[in-house]
Amino acid sequence: MTISGTTRLYVVLGDPVIQVQSPGLLNPLFAELDIDAVLVPVHAPAPDLERIVAGLRAVANLDGIFVTVPHKAAVAGLADRCSPMVEITGSANALRREADGRWYAENFDGTGFVAGLVEAGHDPKARPVALVGAGGAGSAIAAALLAAGADRLAVCDPDKAKLTALQARLDAHWPGRTSVSAEPDTAGAEIVVNATPLGLRPDDPLPFRPAELAPGCVVADIIMKPRETRLLREAAALGHDVHYGIHMLAGQLDSYRAFFGLG
């Protein structure tokens, strides 16, 4: 890849940013499609996020912003326009510059996650699902699971206000199919998802206990680095099917191509 004065820029914002995997997927895609563009990680400390986004919006050759933890909810509020999915979830993971110079926010986390599940043979349709984490990614995954026909969805997060707000938004579209709790409610679940950052560091506690899950449960983690978190190791050792975080990103590639008009 040759970077020159004609190269279009894309960034991925996070805090931390060392774990991001999107440059390893998007930059080869740019090369494959012969697109003169590059995606680079930008470490954006939370207190400086608004200032950083304002600066990036002013960069004339910047076409897109990808967003990872913990900025997905905050960035949604910094866009000029938002998609229906962003309105439902309250979070965004991609922003593009429109022809009029305004920035439009979308969230592909949920649809990408569900696409990865289906591709791996774990279609959530008509199945009970438990989701731990109601942050930016968790909110998007919750909406996508319901849209994909999950039988019922139990969402856990210690932040009661965040949970209540998410449940209200979900109930407006899929009434009565979501329950919420401060502690993980995995009873009867056939698919259990970790949508928290727990597992990024080796000394993190488990988001839930795999030993308490029903036999044959699918355990999914959205963390991409490390690929095999402690949660997935322990779940696999107990005989559960495990689903890796990279599937969520891979499931978004076609959506990114369409959203940014890449070939």
Image (cartoon, rainbow, N blue to C red):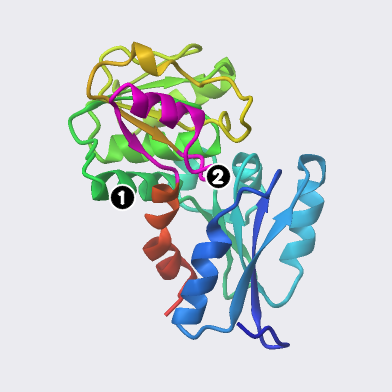
Evaluate whether residue 70 shows in this view: yes
- Residue sitting at 35 percent across and 16 percent down? 186
Q: x, y (%) of residue 226? A: 54, 42
Q: Eyeballing the image, is 180 above or below 243? A: above
Q: Residue at x 40, y 42 (%)?
A: 244
Q: Is residue 127 magenta?
A: no
Which residue occupies the extreme front position in the image?
237
Total label count?
A: 2
Per the image, the residue denoted by label 1 is 115
- Label 2: state its secondary structure: loop
Q: 81 or 64: which is nearer to us?
A: 64
Q: Is residue 44 left or right of residue 37?
A: right
The magenta region covers 222-245
Which quarter of the figure has residue 167? top left
Q: Which of the 4 quarters of the picture holds residue 176?
A: top left
Give the number of the disc on residue 225: 2
Image quadrant containing the C terminus: bottom left
